[in-house]
Structures are given as C-alpha cells and as structure tokens.
Image (tube, grey):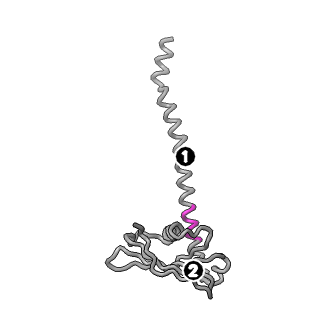
Amino acid sequence: MSIIETITDVDNGFLSRRELTCNFAGLGGKLKSLEAVDMITKEFKLDGKVIIPMRLRTHVGKSLITGTFYVYDDEGLAKKHINPTIFSRLEKTKAKIAEAEAAAEEATAEEAPAEETEVKADAETPEETKKEEKSE
C-alpha cells in the first residue's frame, strides 16, 4: 500500500507543466517539502524534471497532508512562471541540508582517527613498557 494517493493529475498545455495534487497519508506534521518532492519523484518516475512544491496543506484532526506540485521539463520556463521567492527558499533549504551533511561527514572523519589512536594507546600502556624495561 502506497502512502501517496493521487487526487488530480492535470497536463496544463497552456503553461507547459503538469500539475499534481496528492494526499500523503500518515505523515501529518512530519513531512517537509523537499522530502515530498523526493517521494513524488520516485512515485511518478520524474527523474530529470523540475518539481516545485507549491503547497503542503495539513488537515485538522487527521494525519493527512495534501500537496500541490508543478512539474516542468525546463527550469528556465519554471523560473519565468513562478515567483522567484519560492526558488530562493528552495535554494536556502538545499544549502542548509548540504551544510548539515558536510558537517556530519567531518564529524565522522574526525572520530575515525581518534578511535585508531585510542586502540594504539591501549595496546601498549606505560606500565607494560616499564615492566619490559625492568625485566631486561
């Protein structure tokens, strides 16, 4: 069972875009716009297309979100039709996600050498070296 239910799927020939309206069941309050875009891309196999999340609306008393998405073939046409503020917000969100991933990679890279030095230090403690020196 898929958690994405398609309400409308309209090809708008006048504006050269596809307009999708979908329900996301069980994700009320937990779904972010870029996650919704990823889910829509996988569900409808829209790789290589520009998907703009226009609206994510929650329903009172239900764990249901209704999302409206515009799917363009050309990014230039999308920027011409849609308010530039929406694109700037999407870029800011993508930048924050990229920074968080970079920070996480740096943290894991710093932890790995620290663990190796701890292992080396445990292998030969100062007490063992003193015992070896006394026995010789």
124 or 85: which is nearer to us? Answer: 85
| Range shown magenta | 91-98
Verify whether residue 14 appears in magenta. Answer: no
Residue 49 vertical placement versus 124 (above, below) = below
Q: Which of 73 and 97 is in front in this view?
A: 73
Q: Is residue 97 left or right of residue 61?
A: right
Query: Which residue, given by chain and number where applicable, does mark 1 sit on?
Result: 110
Q: Nearer the viewer, residue 52 or 95?
A: 52
* Residue type for callout 2: Arg
Secondary element under disc 2, as helix, strand or loop, is strand
- Specify the amino acid type for callout 1: Glu
* Residue tagged 2: 18
Q: In this view, does 59 lie to the left or right of 104?
A: left
SS for callout 1: helix
Marks 1, 2: nearer the viewer: 2
Q: Main secondary structure of the magenta part?
A: helix
Q: Quadrant of residue 97?
A: bottom right
Query: Closer to the N terminus: mark 1 or mark 2?
Result: 2
Residue sticking out furthest to the bottom:
14
Q: Residues within 10 Å of mark 2 (few under 14, many from 20)?
A: some
The image shows residue 84 at horizontal and vertical percentages of 61, 80
Q: 105 above or below 134?
A: below
The image shows residue 83 at horizontal and vertical percentages of: 60, 83
Furthest toward the top, the residue is 136
**Which of the 4 image quadrants contains residue 4?**
bottom left
Q: How many marks?
A: 2
Distance in Å between CA atoms under marks 1 and 2: 46 Å
x, y percent for residue 28: 38, 72
